[in-house]
Image (cartoon, grey):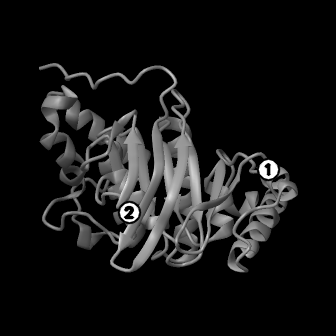
Amino acid sequence: MTATPLPQAPEGTPLIECRNASVRFGDFTALHDVTLTVPESPGKGNFISILGPSGCGKSTLLNLVAGLLMPSAGQVLYRGQPVTRPGSDRGMIFQQYSSFPHLNVRRNVLFGMEINKHRLGLDRRQRLERAGRLIDHVGLAGHEDKYPHQLSGGQQQRVAIARTLALEPGVLLMDEPFSALDEPTRLEMQELIVQLWDRIHPTILCVTHSITEAVYLGERVWIFSRAPGQVAFDIGDCIPRSPGIAPRVAQEQADFKNAARVVMEAFRRVSDGQIAASPAAAKETR
């Protein structure tokens, strides 16, 4: 059995594109006229952290890209095609632990590959080999036969990450994936996901409420305005690279502290209602 190739987008087509996308829930507008692009970055991937006040539409954007929600107006495209439903090419990791309680670690990681085995073109041996590699990558070697109730919260999120990456999605969407974890475990998971991104190269969009987490994880930081949400700041040039550096070490470095100050100032402007950056601010933060 061979995999069915996905349609190839024309060269230069963005990986993700929102065209004047708005989302309304009754009288409440969560996102308004959002226009943005995330380029294809073969062999590298993008890592974008997303910050913003509560209720500004951060998670709504992830749900649009995932196909779990349709825009009330405008379009969301993935590789040039309108997003109309969820797909295995866009993986989602939630704040809540999402392992299947009746399956052990190995079978949880295999689950998506079994459902998509014809598309993936992998036989049973190949699926087991991929599951084994990913279980090792996320630090769960030796836990393959354990069930979710036998794992810590951090270990359960490692299972979710391995299960999602097993399908080799072009985009990994993470909605506050570490917020329920204690601080030491949260730092371990931050380091893990940066290492995986540097090794496997998916494009990652990660919603967080922590400025230090956003700066450590992302190579770019989007800051959303208050609802109805739009991207008020796109901060990239000052964000240092983190692969190979532990979070606590990174946070003590001068370039990290400078980036955190820039992000904090932009976030303060958003919180104070200064939605649009001035030309000087744009130059400072981009």
Instruction: Decide which of 85, 126 is in the foreground and name it.
Output: 85
Instruction: Decide which of 273, 122 is in the foreground and name it.
Output: 273
Q: Amino acid at mark 1?
A: Cys
For the question of whether residue 140 can be seen, the reply is no
Q: In the figure, 214 relative to 194: above or below?
A: below
Q: Amino acid at mark 2?
A: Gln
Q: Earlier in the sequence, mark 2 or mark 1?
A: 2
Quarter of the image where one finds residue 279: bottom right
Quarter of the image where one finds residue 190: bottom right
- Left or right of 213 on screen, residue 6: left
x, y percent for residue 166: 31, 41
Quarter that holds the N terminus: top left
- Dot 2 falls on a residue whose secondary structure is helix
For image coordinates 47% across by 66% down, the residue present is 31
The residue that label 2 is drawn on is: 157
- Left or right of 211 on screen, residue 103: left
Instruction: Decide which of 48, 145 is in the foreground and name it.
Output: 48
